[in-house]
Image: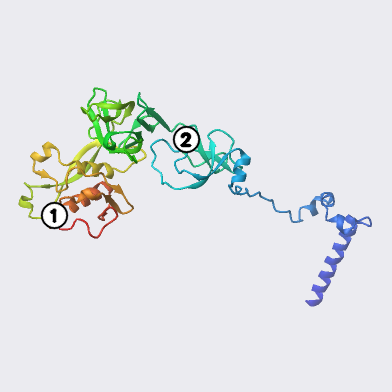
Amino acid sequence: MLGLAIIFLAICLATFVEIRNDYFGQNALPRNDRQSSTFVGDLPTVLHDVIPKKAATTTTPTAPAELTAETCSRAGGTWNECGSLCRGKPPGTVCAQICIPQCECTVGEKQCPDGYACASDLPAGDGVCRPDEGGGKIPVPPAKSVREFRSADGVTSVVLAADQTLTNPFEFYGTSTAFENTISWQVKQLDGKIVAQGNIMTLSPDAGVPGQFMVKGFYDAIPNSASGTLVVFEASAEDGSPIHMVEIPVNLSTNRTKVYVYWGNSKKNPQAQNCSLVYPVAHEVVAPGPDDPKAVAIAMHELLKGPTTWEKSQGYYTSLPLKIADPSFTLFGLEFQADLQEGVGGSCRTAAIRAQINETYKRNKGVKENPIISINGRTEDILQP
C-alpha cells in the first residue's frame, strides 16, 4: 500500500510540472509581474477561476466632523458659545435657562458643516446644526408642522398644529402679557357652544413682561360640528371682557368612544360602610387622537370633573377635591400636584380617593396593578389620614 501511494504522488507531480511548462513555458514573466493584474488577466479561464478572488471592499461613512467655532463659521453658520435651547422652537416653548454652544443657521440654507443639517421645529427661520441621519434627514418635525396666530394688537401669540385639528387631548402654546399672568381659552363649535375651556398661568418674570404658556386641553362635550373656533384671550381687569384675543378656525374631533370612571354611591353603599367600594360608570367622550391611543388620560380627566347632575341623582359621589389639575403620567403611575390632598383628612376618605384613582386607571389602561400615585415626586407621605 505504501508503494502504491508513492507511485500515485509521483504521477501527480509529473502531471503538474507538465501543465506548468505548457502554460507558462520558457517565457514566463518574472515573479513580481506574475502578481500583477495584467498577468492574472492573461491566465486561462480554468486556472483564473481557482485563484481566490479579492473580497469586495465597502466604504464606511465617515462620522461628522467635530462641530466647532471654526467648522461652523467655515460652513457659513454663526457660532454662539451661549446658545439657547429655545433656538428653533416655536414661540411659547418652555426651555431650561442654560448656555450651550451652538452653530446657528437658517432653515433651507447650506450653513452647516458636512455631516450636519439645519434643524428647526419651525418651517422657516432660525435653526441649529444637528447631525444628519443620511440623505439630508434630520430628527425634526416635517416642515410646516405648526402655525402661529397673533391677536390684532400683537400682544398674544398662539402656536398650534398646522392642520389646525384639535384631537383629544390637544395642545397649543404661545406668549402673552396678561393681568395676574392668567390667560383664558375656549373651544367653540359652529353654533358657539363651548365644548372645552380653561385657564392657564403664563411664565412671566414680571408684570407687563410677555410670558410663555402651554395648554393641554380635553373636550368637556362632544362637538356637533366638525369645525369650530379656538379662542385665546385675557379677561379684562376692568369688566372681564376679552382683550388681546386670538380667534383661530379649527377642525374638531367628533369620533366617540367610552371610558369608565369610578364613584362612590350612597345608595349602594350606605354610610360608606366599605370606604374602598367604588362603582364604574361609562362616559361617552371624544375618542383620543392617533398620537395618543390610550384612553386613560381622558378617563382621569373625566374623573376629576366629578359626577354629572344625573349621576348625583342616582347616588353617585366623588371623594376627590374639586378643581384638581390633570395629572402627568409616569412609567408606573400618576403624578399629581398638591391640590390632590388639600383639605383632605380621615382614613376613610383617603382610602376612597385611592380606590377611585386606582380603579379608573386600571380599567381604562387595561392593567391589573394599581398605579404608583405621587404628589410632586413624593409617594410615602401623601394622602395620609
Residue 79 at what x, y percent from top left?
56, 42
Numbered circle sitting on residue 345: 1
In this picture, is 283 found above or below 340? above
Position of 1 compared to 156: left or right? right
Q: Residues within 10 Å of mark 1 (few under 14, many from 20)?
A: few
The image quarter containing residue 332 is bottom left
Residue 309 at what x, y percent from top left?
12, 36
Taking depth in this image into account, of 46 and 254 the one nearest to the observer is: 254
Position of 383 compared to 23: left or right? left
Taking depth in this image into account, of 115 and 95 the one nearest to the observer is: 95
Taking depth in this image into account, of 308 and 384 the one nearest to the observer is: 384
* Furthest residue toward right: 26
Kind of element beneath mark 2: loop
* Furthest residue toward front: 207
Numbered circle sitting on residue 249: none
Taking depth in this image into account, of 127 and 155 the one nearest to the observer is: 155
Q: Which residue is mark 2?
A: 142
Amino acid type at image mark 2:
Pro
Residue 297 at what x, y percent from top left?
28, 44
Amino acid type at image mark 1:
Gly
Kind of element beneath mark 1: loop
Residue found 39% across the figure and 39% down from its top? 93
Residue found 18% across the figure and 58% down from its top? 384
